[in-house]
């Protein structure tokens, strides 16, 4: 019966929001953006924007200003096209984001790779090992450093959404954004949680410890509500692909 048990397990994981990749409908991100739009957001940040699919959805569904970061040079050129279409609302920066400023080696496959990562430990993941065979050295900033230097260009008192999709480097991005999170109190912080975190040594619980005053929710593939989870529970720390949202406790859902 083990084969049947394995099949049931995989179906149960999908029903609980895991391994539903890779369109906004299947991941639940499409519904989340529609929910976000009802809050009339003003400022959203997309760390690890890749080709700009997520940023474009925010621009389409809301009137928010979007700040995007993408380290791969050729992928960044696609964001420049999005900038030309939304010159007053979209701002893109060709750099990585982490917990300290400097230069880091980025591991990637093709020029528009969605698996590009600063975490060399990602090579332990079979589908990443086969693709991330190239390296490039890229500049890296912190969210705190960015707002210290460029904050005057964006006269907003708070952040509506901080979205982080950095293939195992999410915890580092949060570390480099602690002061910004304290001062600008994002309403929502969304991050991808995946196999990468197993090898980088971070659980969902570690992420939640950095975010005092926030509750943890998982995005599900269907429905228009967020599924609240307890990050201390083992079943909330499953290292399969999913997206989680940390919602500020005073924000009505």
Image: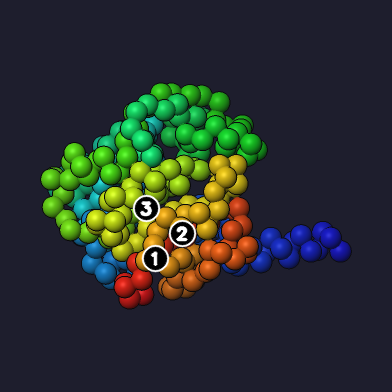
Residue 130: percent from the left, percent from the top?
61, 32
As drawn, the label of residue 125 is none
The answer to whether marks 3 and 2 mark residues whose Cβ atoms lie closer than 8 Å is no
**In-front residue for pair 149/80:** 149
The answer to whether marks 2 and 1 mark residues whose Cβ atoms lie closer than 8 Å is yes
From this view, report whether residue 175 is shown above or below residue 14: above
Q: Earlier in the sequence, mark 3 or mark 1?
A: 3
Residue 55 visible from this viewpoint: no
Residue on which disc 3 sits: 163
Seen at 44% across and 73% down, the residue is: 225
Label 3 vs label 1: CA separation?
15 Å
Residue on which disc 2 sits: 208
Residue 161: percent from the left, percent from the top?
31, 58
Give the side of residue 80 with respect to residue 87, left or right.
Answer: right
Residue on which disc 1 sits: 214
Seen at 60% across and 42% down, the residue is: 199
Label 3 vs label 2: CA separation?
15 Å
Secondary-structure class at tag 1: strand
Of badges 3 and 1, nearer the viewer stands: 1
Secondary-structure class at tag 3: strand
Label 2 vs label 1: CA separation?
8 Å
User: From the image, which quarter does the N terminus lie in?
Assistant: bottom right
- Can you tell which quarter of the image residue 18 is in? bottom right
Secondary-structure class at tag 2: helix
Q: Identify the colour scheme used.
A: rainbow
Q: Earlier in the sequence, mark 2 or mark 1?
A: 2
Give the side of residue 189 with respect to residue 107, left or right.
Answer: left
Of badges 3 and 2, nearer the viewer stands: 2
Residue 55: percent from the left, percent from the top?
32, 50
Residue 229 visible from this viewpoint: yes
């Amino acid at each position: 019966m083990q084969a049947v048990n394995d099949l049931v397990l995989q179906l149960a994981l999908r029903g609980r929001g895991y391994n539903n990749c890779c369109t906004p409908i299947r991941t639940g991100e499409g519904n989340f953006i529609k929910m976000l739009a009802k809050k009339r957001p003003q400022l959203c940040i997309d760390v690890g924007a890749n080709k700009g699919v997520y940023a474009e959805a925010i621009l389409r569904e809301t009137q928010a200003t979007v700040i995007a970061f993408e380290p791969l040079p050729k992928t960044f050129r696609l964001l420049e096209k999005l900038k030309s279409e939304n010159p007053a609302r979209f701002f893109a920066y060709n750099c990585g984001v982490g917990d300290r400023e400097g230069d880091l080696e980025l591991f990637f496959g093709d020029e528009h790779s969605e698996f590009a990562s600063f975490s060399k430990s990602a090579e332990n993941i079979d589908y990443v090992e086969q693709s991330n065979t190239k390296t490039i050295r890229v500049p890296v900033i912190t969210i705190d450093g960015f707002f210290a230097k460029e904050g005057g260009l964006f006269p907003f008192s708070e952040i509506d959404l901080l979205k982080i999709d950095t293939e195992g480097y999410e915890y580092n991005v949060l570390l480099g954004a602690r002061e910004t999170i304290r001062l600008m109190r994002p309403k929502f912080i969304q991050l991808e949680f995946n196999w990468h975190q197993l090898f980088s040594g971070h659980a969902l619980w570690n992420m939640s410890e950095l975010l005092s005053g926030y509750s943890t929710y998982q995005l599900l593939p269907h429905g228009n509500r967020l599924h609240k989870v307890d990050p201390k529970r083992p079943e909330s720390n499953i290292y399969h692909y999913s997206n989680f949202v940390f919602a500020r406790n005073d924000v009505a859902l």
